[in-house]
Image (cartoon, rainbow, N blue to C red):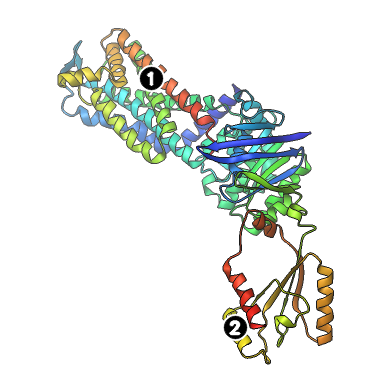
Amino acid sequence: MSALLHFGRFEMLRLIRSWKFLLITVGFPVTFYMLFLGDRRSGEVVAAGSVTWREYLMVAMCSFGCLVAGLTAGGGRLAAERVGGWARQLRVTPLPTWSYVMVKTATSMLVMLPVIVLVEVVSAGFGDVRLAAGRWIELTLVMWVTGLPFAELGVLIGFVAGVETAFPVITALMFVLGYFGGLFNPVSAMPSPLRTAAHLLPSFHGAAAGLSVVNGRPAGLSDWLTLAGYAVGLSALVAWRHRTEEMKGLA
Amino acid sequence: MTAVMVDGLIKRYGGLRAVDGVSFEVDDGEVFALLGPNGAGKTTTVEILEGFRGRDGGQVRVLGMDPADPANGQRLREGMGVVLQELAVEPFLTVRQALRRNAGYYPRPRPVDEVLALVGLEAKADSRIKNLSGGQQRRLDLGLGIIGNPSLLFLDEPTTGFDPTARRGAWDLVRALTGGGTTVILTTHYMDEAEALADRVAVINSGRIVAEGTPQSLGGRDVGETRIRFGLPPGRQVSDLPVAASSVTASSGRTGTSGGTGASGGTGASGSGGQVEIRSDRPVEVLAALTTWALREGVDLAGLTVERLTLEDVYLRLTGYRSGPGELAAVSAEGDSTR
């Protein structure tokens, strides 16, 4: 346990040192928010429960920000680290590899928090979104928790993909999960087959959970169950990948 | 006590037996070198010992544990240090931070400052790792290998890419460590490195150990043949010598002229100066005959040297290296021209 915390401390240090990465990851979703808000700042209702576009976009960009942070912090950085030789350097130490996986997942989750808060701040200031104080806190926590599958997905990509394949895979996933999950446009505006497909994606259910909070309702059970299914499934995949790699030599 | 015991180790890749019945033991505090060409099975063997590869047969004990049993992984890694062949690129941490980070994974690490001093990186302690030179990064790798105060250290080609000064420094470091009782398993391509560091050497070829012994006695080196070399005196033929030469090469840039010398009847072929090499397991007799002849004839044996086979000679012979046709051609050409 102390080795885990020790390792985590140095991962935080490494994260802070990579400020360029942080700046882009945190700045990306708010920039999108302001761009997409455009002239639709008015109270145009786009989703059930009289959710306006500016509210919808806030939740969508929180979700998209978590997606980007999870994929790049986990996938991109981890793949680069493995190629750079540091993952091997760690494997020859007594640090258990599961703590490596845990710390990497936690690091991705940590990056998501400022992403969410910044989108909320800009939504309130620039997009005139108004929520009760308790709602803001609830929304922050819900959006953060829904980021877990994205963090795990990133770590899995980092483990499976090489550094050359990681980036195309990340880009494709950002598009697929972002667009088809309804993060750029409400799913209700999509043709029916796509609407059905959206219900299979964690990005859709993450945003749906956030929209429930905006509507003043608890997030739906089906949203939580789908997200939990993804979280459990992805961690099983990471664990499996991990075990198969363990005895395949250092090269 | 035995630090490492390997008995009948087998590892297959598909139909290929990469490791085919390797056995050896390494005592506590010993430096054991594994030599062999690329693809001989060195790395596979070492990775099995480190617990990063499974095996298909045989017994292995490392620090008293079976490295293939995942239950031993933690304890094994606490007791061993591994210096990897390729350097790691860490863009964000300084040398001291990387050492402190890794120190935290071990129950009884060496003090970071002690390691910095041992690998000679005190002046670079607060530099980012990405700003180190290649040699400095390799020394950091060495430092990371010993930060956990291991009782068994694996060194995989530890001085590849070092300049001569840095190599001597690394050797001194390894000697200092073994002076403190650390067991070392070393793989290297440098014969002088094995000779300088190792207590015992095993040569592995095609998955089998083909010879094992001290660097001084490997492959019968201590009792085997001796090599005597000198320049052929001006105006003399190889056939004039009182003993048979094993090989004769013309002096630099004149390889093609030996036939011509013979054709001119050997009359005053001044300065032809071929290099003569004689291999013998009775060097005293050969030298006595040679020097007696030279004194009687009043000629000099320029650059006379007497050598045992080098470790490299033995290694090349054991790993099946055959010298190219050039040398043999030179001998036969000279032989024809002098008879």
Identify the subunit bearing mark 1: A
Q: Nearer the viewer, residue A67 or B232?
A: B232
Q: CA distance from mark 1 to mark 2?
A: 87 Å
Could you tell me which residue is drawn at 80 percent across and 58 percent down? B223
Residue A208 in picture, x, y percent from top left: 27, 15
Could you tell me which residue is drawn at 69 percent across and 57 percent down? B314
In which quarter of the view is residue B306 placed?
A: bottom right
Could you tell me which residue is drawn at 60 percent across and 34 percent down? B102
Residue B155 in picture, x, y percent from top left: 65, 44
- Amino acid at pointer 1: Trp
Q: Which residue is mark 1?
A: A144
Residue A5 in picture, x, y percent from top left: 56, 24
Q: Does residue A133 appear in this view?
A: no
The quarter of the picture where the N terminus of chain B appears is top right
Q: Which residue is mark 2?
A: B259
Q: Nearer the viewer, residue B26 or A4?
A: B26
